[in-house]
Amino acid sequence: MIWGLAALAGAYAVAVARLRRRDIDWPVGRSLAWYAGVATAAAATFGQHHDFRAHMSAHLLLGMAAPLLLVLGRPVTLVLRVLPVRPARRVSRLLRTRVAWVLTHPVTAAVLDAGGLWLLYTTGLYAQAMARPWLHTLVQVHMLLAGGLLTAAIIGRDPAPHRPGPIVRGAVFLAFVAAHGILAKHLYGHPPVGVPAGEAEAGAQIMYYGGDLLHVLVIVLFFRQCFAPAPERRPWRLVSVAPAGESRHHAA
Amino acid sequence: MRNNVLSGALLGIGIAAFIDETVFHQLLHWHHFYDKSTPAAGLVSDGIFHAVSFFATVASLFLLASLRREGAFRARPWWGGLLTAAGAFQLYDGTVQHKLMRLHQIRYEVDLTAYDWTWNIIAGLLIVAGVVLLTRSRTAVAA
């Protein structure tokens, strides 16, 4: 897992360096978001958490915080920009396939993510994963990937030929947030196999309130996109009384 | 006009849910996080309302910002929407979620009658105030 994450950070760094050599601008904010995302995921995967509270904190970092940061790093845009024309075309053709459509659809992502969580905590899977390191790693990879798919489907700015409209994306995320909250409250009263009641109660509240915090961030980003005025409807850009910092802000 | 009411109403739901969460759950610890006698329907209803309240708050603030940007903000319908929706949410919480679905009670180990009546009467007052503002803003527009 750590090696995979190191490879993600390395590949991004190489790609950005190549762009810079070709004098193509790549915003620093995106790079920072990507490295912060990798670091968050790495922090979450250190050690195997047998305490349910620690496990739940790591789950929030790995399944929601890290994916959010990684998505803000716009990896697909970077890949398309850094590759030579022919391979880049192949990638964009891949993005237009039916398989990609199904995989990146918000409903698929939400079902994979929420479904995975329900399986993990309401069946014996959690206890199994705690006993087998390879299964634990698999669960972690699933969390990061499913979280990444979902975040990208809801607020991604990368090119996505099939991205549905805001109503579908908003409704799917609303359903996901509800399912997440319902599962957290369910766990409060029904601890997973092998978890003491006290730990389950504390862990469930971490999941509930920590989840809220991260969901609000995603919702804010989502509505910021929805309410972003179209470029031609930006009257204040024509008015030159804006303070100096303002223009930089809009360019970002 | 319609967007003013909508923005106010969305914020009303958000504020009512927020007060419920911070004051009664976090500060007073009157409500329980999860009452183990809660049936599944109560849990689902609570989860959906919780998610809706987030979405509503954020959406209403962005809508408010865009109304102000376009100079279309009107205070009266906005407050009317806010109070009506906050009251309606409180009434739903107090009747359906607390009583019908028995999600959790306002307080434990006390006689609930006074608490329940206060809760729902406040909800009723909010709705009345909101509806008055809404009708007055409508006549103001017509005049």
Image: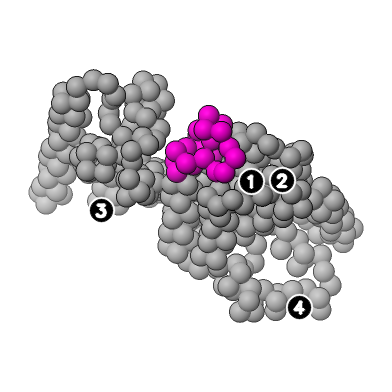
Secondary structure, mark 4, is helix
User: Start and end of the magenta stretch?
Assistant: A185-210
- In screen coordinates, is A251 left or right of A220? right
Along the line of sight, the residue nearer the viewer: A231 or B120 = B120
Mark 1, other Cα within 10 Å: few <14 / some 14–19 / many ≥20: some
| Measured Cα–Cα span from mark 2 to mark 4 | 42 Å
Question: Residue A57, can we see it?
Answer: no
Mark 4, other Cα within 10 Å: few <14 / some 14–19 / many ≥20: few
The relative height of residue A219 versus residue A149 in the rendered view (above or below) is: above
Along the line of sight, the residue nearer the viewer: B61 or B42 = B42
Q: Residue at x 57, y 44 (%)?
A: A193
Q: Are marks 1 and 2 on the same chain?
A: yes
Q: If you read the primary sequence from the N terminus, does the residue marked by circle 1 or circle 4 appear first? A: 4
Circle 3 residue: B2
Three-letter code, disc 2: Ala
Given the image, what chain letter belongs to the residue carrying mark 2?
A
Q: Residue at x 87, y 56 (%)?
A: A14
Residue A148, percent across and down?
64, 56
